[in-house]
């Protein structure tokens, strides 16, 4: 049997995802356990984290395991990922050694590495994550690179809890772009589109202009998943059209892919669409929709205080579920041997 990683949810069958959600719910009811007794995970953070680091460390502890946190370039050596590179720069060691050595120490490796935001054709290769998966001899978990599969699972779990059913087909789901003063990673948007269509919802991607469409890979995944799961997928630039009758509103900011590496040219477009903020007026257009966000969120920039503090906001539930789904993922991955 080939080694199984958790790099993206598309690699896992719907039955497998449902089983992870069932196990996550069990861990939520009974947090302590021994599924990771004598096991360990190395968590490599190339970028900052609050929820991801806390939930993975705590999750390993609650299941009687051990997490080791490393920040390459800060408290660990900088790593080179280019094959055949003449290493006369800043990097002190190569991924070929790093991944294989860590595999001798720990039972799993988690990786968080954001894009460089200079060239999307380079960033979309997801080189850091794929390099760990290539060289590691233990399971690798994506803790957010160009997708965020752990967030996907926590999001779906929160929706199933709110609606009281595992069957989300027929729910009208709006994935809305929102303004942010800086261009951000498309990872959560890619993942939200992937998982919402996978679970058969009727998904609308709401964004200011066609330039804010997600990478064609994820647009194609959205269409494919919808066709297979009995849902639908479309893109809209009309706020009222998108919000009307919605059951779920999920907000995220992201930079327009055509402007990667030349963000000053994109800034006027972004600045002209601050009205995409999620507010009470927009939520009033929905069919009593729930609102969520992956967090962190800039209040009164992405969503108003009124929306964030309303009973309709399930962002905190989603954030809590990160702990439970990640425990389920870790427990599943170590059960391979």
Image (cartoon, rainbow, N blue to C red):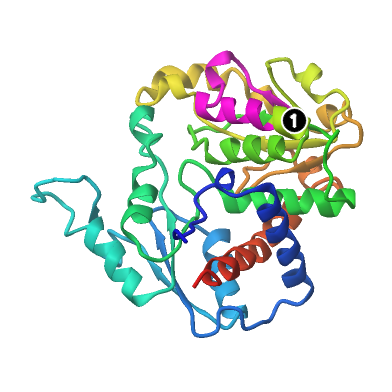
Task: Residue 208 in the image: state x and y as whole percent.
Answer: 62, 18
Task: Residue 176 in the image: state x and y as whole percent.
Answer: 68, 29
Q: How many marks?
A: 1
In-front residue for pair 320/218: 218
Please tell me in which quadrant of the rendered image residue 302 appears: top right
Q: Which residue is mark 1?
A: 174
Q: Is residue 280 left or right of residue 298?
A: right
Residue 245 visible in the displayed image: yes
In-front residue for pair 156/182: 156
Question: Of helix, strand and loop, which one carries label 1?
Answer: strand
User: Which residue is pictured at 62% across the width and 43% down the height?
Assistant: 298
User: Which residue is pictured at 39% across the width and 41% down the height?
Assistant: 126
User: Which residue is pictured at 76% across the width and 45% down the height?
Assistant: 308
* Vertical relation: 10 (above or below) 20: above
In-front residue for pair 20/247: 20
User: Which residue is pictured at 41% across the width and 66% down the height?
Assistant: 138
Residue extending farthest front: 1
Q: Is residue 233 left or right of residue 163?
A: left
Please tell me in which quadrant of the rendered image residue 73 appears: bottom left
Report the magenta residues as a range.
202-225
- Magenta region includes residue 216: yes
- Magenta region includes residue 214: yes
Task: Residue 188 in the image: state x and y as whole percent.
Answer: 58, 41
Task: Residue 51 in the image: state x and y as whole percent.
Answer: 58, 60
């Amino acid at each position: 049997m080939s080694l199984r990683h958790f790099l993206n949810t598309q690699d896992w069958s719907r039955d497998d995802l449902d089983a992870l959600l069932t196990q996550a719910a069990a861990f939520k009811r009974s947090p302590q356990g021994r599924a990771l007794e004598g096991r360990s995970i190395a968590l490599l953070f190339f970028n900052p984290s609050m929820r991801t680091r806390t939930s993975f460390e705590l999750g390993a502890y609650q299941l009687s395991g051990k997490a080791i946190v490393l920040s390459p370039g800060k408290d660990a050596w900088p790593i080179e990922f280019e094959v055949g590179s003449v290493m006369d720069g800043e990097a002190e060691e190569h991924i070929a050694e790093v991944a294989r050595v860590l595999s001798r120490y720990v039972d799993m490796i988690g990786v968080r590495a954001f894009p460089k935001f200079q060239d999307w054709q380079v960033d979309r290769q997801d080189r850091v994550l794929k390099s760990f998966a290539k060289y590691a001899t233990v399971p690798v978990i994506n803790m957010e690179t160009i997708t965020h599969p752990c967030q996907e699972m926590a999001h779906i779990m929160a929706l199933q809890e709110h609606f009281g059913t595992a069957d989300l087909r027929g729910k009208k789901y709006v994935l809305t772009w929102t303004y942010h003063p800086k261009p951000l990673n498309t990872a959560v948007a890619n993942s939200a589109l992937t998982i919402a269509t996978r679970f058969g919802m009727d998904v609308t991607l709401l964004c200011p202009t066609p330039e804010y469409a997600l990478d064609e890979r994820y647009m194609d995944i959205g269409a494919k998943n919808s066709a297979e799961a009995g849902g639908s997928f479309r893109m809209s630039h009309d706020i009222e059209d998108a919000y009307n009758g919605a059951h779920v509103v999920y907000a995220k900011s992201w930079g327009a892919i055509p402007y990667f590496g030349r963000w000053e040219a994109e800034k006027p477009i972004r600045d002209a669409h601050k009205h995409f903020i999620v507010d009470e007026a927009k939520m009033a257009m929905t069919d009593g929709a729930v609102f969520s966000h992956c967090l962190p969120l800039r209040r009164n920039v992405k969503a108003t205080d009124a929306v964030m503090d309303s009973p309709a906001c399930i962002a905190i539930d989603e954030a809590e579920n990160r702990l439970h789904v990640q425990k389920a993922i870790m427990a599943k991955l170590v059960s391979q041997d």
